[in-house]
Every structure is written in C-alpha cells, then in structure tokens.
Image (tube, rainbow, N blue to C red):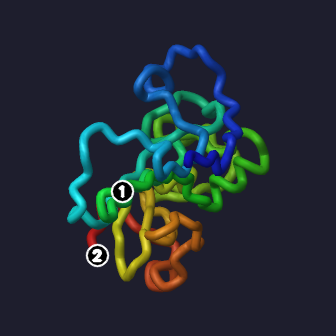
C-alpha cells in the first residue's frame, strides 16, 4: 500500500540554475506512507531486525527569497520501521510556525542564511532572520522525536511511531526562552 498523505504545494520554478534545487538535490514536496506488498524490497529483511531509522533533511517548498542555500529548505523527516521481516516508510514535513505561515501564504516569507538582510519580518535563529525549518537535528527522547534547526530555533516534537505533529516542545521552550537550541544538540 502506498498512500500519498499530502500532494505537495510547491511553488518552485523548474528548470532553474541552482544545483541544490535540481537532480539528486531536487526537493521532495509529496509526503508518502508505504508498506506491505507495494513497498519493493530487494533481498530479504532479517526477521530479528526490529526498530526505526529516522533522518531529517531540507526540502525547499517555495521559490526562495534571494539566493538559496541547502540549509534553507523546510525540515522533512524520513522514517523506516523494521518489524518481523517487514518494513514501512513515511516522510513528513515538520509543521513549524514558519512552515505553516508559508503554506498559508503560498510563498516564501523569509530569506535564507546567505541573504538574511532581505528579511521583511522577524524570524528565528541567532540573528532573528531565518525560518524555523527543523532540517538539521533529530533526536529521539522519551518516545518522541525532537527536531530543530541550526541557528537556535525552538524544538518541535513528533510522534516516533506515526510522525504525527505534536507541536513545539513546551518544556524545552520554557527552559530555553528565546535562545532556542543550536545545531547538533545532544540529550
């Protein structure tokens, strides 16, 4: 079974001359769930392999404001679960405040790290100019996935079994105030 969870809403223009928006780096804007016989496995998955592999990355959804850097894209989680010789895959965007604002506007609202001076509204990060894209860090803690970006954004929680969005982590947010979490944090 392959379900398309979200058909995407990209406003990127193709072709373009940015190597980080093309070829193997072309952003993914469709969210999938794949499992069962429709998920092709080459070889055999050991029956005693149990658990989850999760990673995050950056996927630009809208035409960037100014020059695009690979760290500017919206955070997307990719997770693979292994259980008794079977596998399941899902990918989901993290619904940060910035992601939801741009989804509603249908365009980019914040510039990236190369041209922060082009900002027209307050953002996140150490210079208050960037979007909170959660594409840098992913840590599993207390049964929840905690994702954050570099440059000190607020951390977001995601259910580790479904990738359902649980919103900003209120406990960490209270402890950190407006300082956020820097990249590559450890729990």
Q: Look at mark 1 in the image and give the residue it sits on.
A: 86
Q: Is residue 130 visible?
A: no
Residue sitting at the far front: 37
- Residue at coordinates 44% horizontally, 56% vertically from top-left? 149
Q: Nearer the viewer, residue 50 or 177?
A: 50
How far across and how far down the image is residue 78, in percent?
43, 51
Instruction: Characterize the local packing of mark 2: few (<14), some (14-19) or many (20 or more) Cα atoms within 10 angstroms.
Output: few
- Residue at coordinates 78% horizontally, 50% vertically from top-left? 104
How far across and how far down the image is residue 33, in percent?
54, 51
Could you say which quadrant of the image residue 138 lies in?
A: bottom left
Instruction: Characterize the local packing of mark 1: few (<14), some (14-19) or many (20 or more) Cα atoms within 10 angstroms.
Output: some
Horizontal side of residue 54 vs 10, given as left or right: left
Q: Which quarter of the rendering shows the C terminus? A: bottom left
Local SS, label 2: loop
Could you say which quadrant of the image residue 146 lies in?
A: bottom left
Local SS, label 1: strand
Q: Is residue 22 above or below residue 70?
A: above
Q: Is residue 92 visible?
A: yes
- Residue at coordinates 56% horizontally, 46% vertically from top-left? 2
Q: Nearer the viewer, residue 38 or 67?
A: 38
Q: Nearer the viewer, residue 172 or 121?
A: 172
Q: Look at mark 2 in the image and give the residue it sits on.
A: 187
Task: Specify which label sits upstream in the sequence, 1 or 2.
Answer: 1
Disc 1 to disc 2: CB gap under 8 Å: no
How far across and how far down the image is residue 103, in percent?
72, 48
């Amino acid at each position: 079974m392959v379900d398309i969870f979200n058909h995407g809403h990209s406003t990127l223009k193709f072709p373009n001359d940015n190597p980080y928006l093309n070829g193997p780096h072309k952003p993914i804007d469709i969210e999938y769930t794949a499992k069962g016989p429709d998920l092709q496995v080459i070889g055999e998955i050991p029956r005693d392999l149990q658990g989850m592999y999760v990673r995050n990355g950056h996927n630009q959804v809208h035409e960037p404001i100014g020059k695009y850097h690979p760290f500017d894209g919206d955070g997307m989680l990719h997770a693979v679960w292994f259980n008794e010789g079977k596998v399941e895959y899902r990918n989901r965007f993290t619904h940060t405040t910035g992601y939801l604002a741009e989804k509603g506007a249908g365009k980019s609202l914040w510039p990236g790290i190369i041209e922060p001076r082009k900002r027209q509204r307050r953002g996140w990060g150490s210079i208050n100019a960037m979007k909170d894209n959660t594409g840098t860090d992913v840590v599993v803690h207390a049964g929840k996935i905690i994702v954050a970006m570099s440059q000190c954004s607020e951390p977001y929680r995601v259910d580790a079994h479904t990738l359902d969005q649980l919103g900003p982590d209120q406990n960490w947010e209270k402890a950190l105030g407006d300082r956020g979490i820097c990249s590559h944090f450890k729990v």
